[in-house]
Image: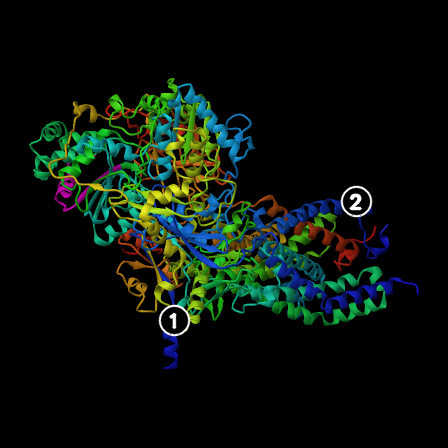
Amino acid sequence: MDSALIPKGVKRCPTWQFALWIGAAGAVLLWGVFAMLLCWFKGLNQTNMNDSYGFALWIWADLAVIALGGGAFFTGFLRYIVGKDELKNIINYAVLIGFICYSSALLILAIDIGQPLRGWFIFWHANVHSMLTEVAFCLTCYFGVLTIEYVPLILENRQIDKVPFFHRISHNLHEIMAVFAATGAFLSFFHQGSLGGVPGVLFGRPFAYREGLFIWPWTFFLYTWSAAACGPCFTILVTWITEKITKKKLVKQNVIELLAKISGWMIGTYIIAKIIDTWYWAKVTAPASGFNLMDFYSNNPFYGIWILILEIVICGVVPALILITEKGRKNPVMLMTGIILAVLGACVNRWVMVLQVMAVPVLTFESWAMYYPSWQEVATTILPVAYGVILISLSYRYLPVFPQEQELNPEV
Amino acid sequence: MKEEQNHEKAKQFGMVIDLDKCTGCGACMVACMAENNVPFKEDESKKLDSITWLRVYKLTNGKPFPDTEICYLPRPCQHCGGKGNHGHSPCVSVCPATATDYSKETGIVSQIYTRCFGCRYCMAACPYHARYFNWWDPVWPDGMEKYLSPNVSVRMRGIVEKCSFCFHRYQIAMDKAYYEGRGELEENEYQTACTQACPANAITFGDLNNSGHAVHELKKDKNAFRLLERLQTNPKVYYISSREWVRRAGDNYLKTEKK
Amino acid sequence: MKIDRRCFLSLGIGGAAGIALSPLPWKLADDSAIWTQMWPWTPVPADGEVTYVKSACTLCPGGCGISVRKVGNRAVKIEGVEGHPVNDGGICPLGLSGLQLLYGPTRVKTPLKRAGERGEGKWIKISWEEAIAEVAKKLGDLREKGESNSVACISGSDKGTVPSLFKRFLSVYGSPNFMRMPSIQDSYEIANSISLGFIAQSGFDLEHADFILSFGSGLIEGWGSPVRMIRANSSWRKAGIKVVQVESRLSNSAAKSDKWIPINPGTEYALALGLAHVIIRESLYRNDFVHAGALGFIRFRDLVLSNYSPDSVEKITGIKKETIEALAVDFARSGRPVAICGRGHGKAQSSLGELLAVQALNALAGNIGKEGGVFAVNDPAYIAWPAYQVDEAGAAGIKKERIDGAGNGKYGLAKSLTNRFAGAVNSGLPVSLLFVLESNPVYSLPDTKAVKDAFKKIPFIVSFSSFMDDTALNSDLILPNHVYLERYEDVPATAGLSKPVVSLARPVVSPQFNTKHAGDVIILIAKEVGSPVSDAFPWDDYQACLEGTAGDKWKMLNEEGFSSDPAFTAQAVNTSPGKFDLSGGVADLSILFTPVNLEGDPKAYPLLLLPYDSFRIANGYIGDPPFVIKTVEDTVLKGKDILVEINPATASANGLSAGSYAILKTPKGSARVKINLFDGIMPGLVAMPRGLGHTAYDNYLAGKGINVNELIGTLEDPASGLDAAWGIRANLIKA
């Protein structure tokens, strides 16, 4: 039925199967939209957030998808600036995933703020001293860049490409893509960093506060570094999942391994920096405000010190070691374990730097509060996942996302 | 020379709360709610979703019976001056929309309700939990909205609010003073609602910079301390307690640190 | 023109770009932001001229002066009056919340007649004329049948013109049954009667005392006139005056004292006698004052010297004998020491023995009737109305025995024993008609079940409450009074003050609803009932009565808002040395000084339930308004669950932990409670706050927690008829 739209030389599932798949994802999406509308019309009392968890599931999801969406800028950086040409085979997908991640982040932000209709005040009444202002500006600009990076792919659709006008746009955009990739990389370095700055500058919260370079706390650099390190892992993970679902090899293993190797080294260097940062914080920064490391992790009603071990050792050192060694990369199980742990690592880091920041008591007479998200929060957090699934499915079906697909799956 | 004069003129409104006198009766909390149109809900026992600009904390020394001691500690917004008292309060510098500001003239941290869009970053920044988010639309039972004061705007849901040191009282007093051809206020012309209500006279309010105001001397009491001084937030609320454990509860100390 | 795809696309994109560049989206964004800043459902308070009205607070017996800020014709804020002799600018949380009562949803807006079953909450609105006629008809019928003495009134207070009008009404009508809600002043009155020879309340010149010994009184938690007490406390702090709190639980008063002495609950009398033992043994007492040669002193001395040595007192109270010795010496050697009793807010009575033992300390220290000491205070002097004529029916009725027994036989010294009311009604004494004035007995009296049973036996109950409180809900007719902010009324502050003050409540706003001043209503009822009752009420209305009563002080009351002229308010009675009798006419002292045997089998109920008072939970006639309930900590009330305080040791012995649920059982009932661990409470005790568990009022208060009165009972002090129960045996079972 829609065969005219499907790229030439590749095979896609029957329309009914596709419709069913989209329908299922659409149902989840609608559930999320319903929750979103509840939050907009009734207010944030629909959530289980409170004054100790003003930053909760959403902001975590926000920071996590931005970190994981970092695959787009870093792969682009490697492809266009560093010149790792093999990566052209995964860059489309990286951009698409980045686009989904960033649009989701913006959507979640629009739900998360108490007065969405006034959200634009962040631009209008911008406070240049606020890390969040920097985030908002860079994030919005970078989202524009991602859109520009994604558009040529849309224009490559068989039918659209037939229009000479669009064909020419697409061609010209490809020519100058390096410029956008560079812009994107620059913007990303900054907003990933500013997001790291968000907790790092909180000198009233010894759990988050870090010293740093000029106006930038160390978390600024750690965030950028970790996004660059773990973002590509997420790209690989999503590619792998796509391959499993479509039951096709879509990207050659050497491309994946190259990206994994770079990630491995990035994670390795990041985790060394993170360990130094944690050690310095635990030994110097925090004690200056009267806190021992364990003060932050005891009396915690749920996870205690294990969350630090999980973040640094299990989801940091371990994936770095796997991905750095050739043996680790060559073994598919090891490789995916490393990739998944790295993705988890970024997520856990963002969780810690968002939720725990506000929950760790600073006043001696306050205590840890517990929080679990309401269904509305869960639904609105799953909403972007459903949206991502739909956008990926549509893109995969109708756009030439994977240049190597035809080669890897010759028609029988 | 000119700068010095300006410095002389700049006010630093602050509080000294005598915890030896404070009985924990809660009058300050209610005075604050009544003065500032603070909303209430049917269930206010979830304290993390209960707006109390001024909250009275109950502190215990943690010792078993019969050596237990308790002390109450009222906590308004601390109106931090930040490092070096340059006005870089933890919350002011992080607000992305300039919805909260530090007044160099009075030392008061303001909150512009109609500009705040509810990102809650300031709440993350404030170690005192002095900032409260309006999770709910404020609703008054039919007829009860009659007691709302026109001096303080009623807040809408989805924004952050906090203690303003009853700034509207300052404005009203200043208006009156200007009208009478005076540029300066007497100490008693501008007092916060909690200070006025406190049956124990435990709260003293005034200009910390003005040697004629009671707070100027009181803050130098040998038993005076501020909350979390080590964070260099530089709060303008001082506490006095003759009890060592209470003073120590005001900040975090490493176990190895001597008393 | 044919619209092809290309044309369509260009149009679409062009249009979108055009709209984006036009002012439209920006205008819309701006408008929507402005809309969020003035949502139509968020109220905008109207501006207007600001004025202040001086008045008096009637929400507790404290009698504070208040100043109400108005904007236009709305009252917007209540503040304390600076310079007022009671509160000097200070104000308590309840007083601050008065406007929530004035404008609140619990107001009874018009006279209501019960339509459904009692307590069901079904009412029909009736006119004032109908309502008054109905009450008058019932009263007339009862009088005709010679049952005038079966009419009773329970009032929150017996001071001031309005309670006096009700009392006068009953007297001339022919009923002795004017009762006031129980309080520690009942106990002080009897104690004074014994030791001084006349009925008087006790007032304390605490501002000038230099050593305060409190036997469980919530000095800074609502005892006496609450704001005045907190102010006194601040002056003690400033002057370095020592405060010693004797209490089995670390209350706020204990926490703020200089020395907290935990004591086995209910043994306070024994500690007082032990202290007396040391003082007498060491001859530290004021010989002239206690009139050492008098028989009363000799009997008392012999008793304490033989039975209450520090050794034996240590066994009873659990307080080390060294502590007792030292405390006695400290107390007696101070210049102006004062000993105070009356647990918590002082809204419950104590046994006569406890009162006499504590008052004995004051007497031994020679500080009765002296600066910084204890004064016997008469009732307010200004209410002096002309005598009235009683007819035969009235005279016969008034001579009959009171329902609560006060003034008769073994209760001869008591003025009012409302604690005995429910028991008396349940045992068959007839009450045909009950007036309830400014009180909430269904909620506030101990043993709720017995009280409710008693109320069921009363065929006609008339509530004068402004609010739909627990008693109003269980009445047959509500004749809603103006709220204090809508009416004139004299407010005598007598609670523990050595120099009483009378303030004037003045209307701050005009009546918001179809309510009527209770003073006017009782005058109208009297007129309707007819002669001779109506003759005793010569005033046109309450206002005339009040102005006439105030006489030449009226102008001053209006201008200053209060009078503290002793000639007008009340005279402190001069008590000359040598007049104080330590044991009065009590024949057998040992009956006074015996431990109260709490209800319940110690095996089935191994723990003790102790009700406690908190400043943040109003437990008198007025329940907590929304603001005040908001200040209640989540360790006391969480959602609808009440938390009881127990020591961690008690918890582990009973398999309980912080936040867990338990069933609290007493011989009177059981309730599901949550556990709050508190190191400051003696092991073996369970403490529960008074003032929660209302069945009436609004959703901000109703249904929250448990009314402790449902779990406790009364225990008659054999020596006086006072309620001596300070708790009840209990058990906590993990739920």
Res. A127 in view: yes
Q: Does the magenta stretch include residue C336?
A: yes
Q: Position of residue A201 (x, y in %)?
A: 48, 63
Label 1 chain ID = B
Q: Kindly identify the amino acid type of the residue bearing the numbered disc 2.
A: Gln
Res. A294 in view: no
The residue that disc 2 covers is: A17
Q: Where is residue C308 in the image (x, y as percent from the top left)?
A: 14, 30
Which residues fall within the magenta stretch?
Answer: C319-341
Q: Position of residue C185 (x, y in %)?
A: 28, 35
- Quadrant location of the C terminus of chain B in the rendered image: bottom left
Residue A157 vs residue C303, the one in the foreground: C303
Verify CB contact (< 8 Å) between mark 1 and mark 2: no
Disc 2 element: helix
Residue A48 in the image: above or below residue B247: above
The residue that disc 1 covers is: B184
Residue C577 vs residue B246, the one in the foreground: C577
